[in-house]
């Protein structure tokens, strides 16, 4: 069927992927030089791109689960405020009550920020830009203070991709179920 959920999501994805990448490039072109960043430009772009795609997948899932657009709009702020809470720079995850820590695994923003700060303050940037021992110690202390571990960059990347794919698949399922109930 041409009007099913899967063709809809495939066509939506084909449009969103390059559009999201272009937006990430434009954001980093405008910000990178002004902020005096030293990490790899393309890694910053890719981390933002994946994070924004995962955030869009989260919003898409909320929209597919909601009974109407008003409910989806009302549900969005709490979902994205939780993303900020578990992102890391504001409150290290280790300082959040253990009963709520499991929610960090559903927050794409946390993993995107982890990748961006590793790119900006990690060993590769420190070596490439010949940072002084004091600068290196401060950067390592910052990463440790927000519970970001450089060796786990690939885990952060896989979780981010998993959230993107998982939320998109759940949205397809939710939309299919809603369409079956409607027709």
Image: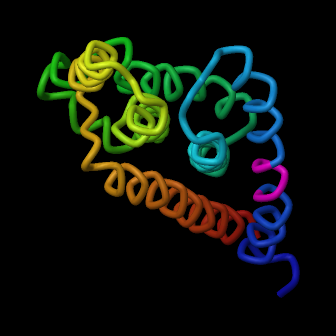
- In this view of the protein, which residue sits in the foreground, 137 or 93? 137
Residue for point 65% across, 69% down = 176
Q: Where is residue 157, by image quadrant? A: bottom left
Here the colouring is rainbow
Instruction: Using the image, determine if residue 10 lies above or below residue 79.
Output: below
Q: Where is residue 100, by image quadrant? A: top left
Residue for point 56% across, 29% down = 38
User: x and y percent of residue 137 in the render?
Assistant: 24, 18
Horizontal side of residue 156 vs 133, given as left or right: right
- In this view of the protein, which residue sits in the foreground, 114 or 136? 136
Residue 19 lies in the magenta-colored region: yes
Horizontal side of residue 88 vs 81, given as left or right: left
Residue 153 lies in the magenta-colored region: no
Q: Quadrant of the N terminus?
A: bottom right
Q: Main secondary structure of the magenta part?
A: helix
Residue for point 60% across, 59% down = 171
Horizontal side of residue 84 vs 19, given as left or right: left
Q: Start and end of the magenta stretch?
A: 17-21
User: x and y percent of residue 179 in the render?
Assistant: 71, 66
Instruction: Using the image, determine if residue 163 lies above or below residue 132.
Output: below
């Amino acid at each position: 069927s041409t009007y099913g959920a899967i063709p809809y999501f495939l066509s939506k994805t084909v449009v969103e992927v390059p559009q999201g990448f272009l937006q990430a490039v434009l954001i980093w072109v405008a910000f990178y030089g002004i902020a005096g960043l030293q990490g790899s430009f393309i890694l910053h772009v890719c981390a933002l791109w994946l994070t924004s795609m995962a955030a869009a997948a989260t919003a898409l899932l909320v929209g597919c689960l909601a009974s109407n657009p008003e409910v989806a709009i009302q549900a969005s702020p709490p979902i994205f405020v939780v993303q900020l809470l578990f992102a890391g720079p504001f409150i290290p995850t280790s300082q959040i009550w253990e009963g709520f820590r499991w929610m960090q695994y559903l927050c794409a923003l946390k993993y995107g920020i982890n990748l961006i700060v590793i790119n900006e303050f990690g060993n590769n940037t420190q070596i490439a830009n010949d940072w002084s021992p004091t600068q290196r110690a401060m950067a390592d202390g910052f990463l440790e203070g927000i519970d970001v571990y450089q060796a786990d960059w690939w885990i952060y990347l896989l979780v981010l991709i998993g959230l993107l794919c998982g939320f998109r698949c759940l949205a397809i399922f939710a939309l299919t179920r809603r369409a079956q109930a409607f027709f």
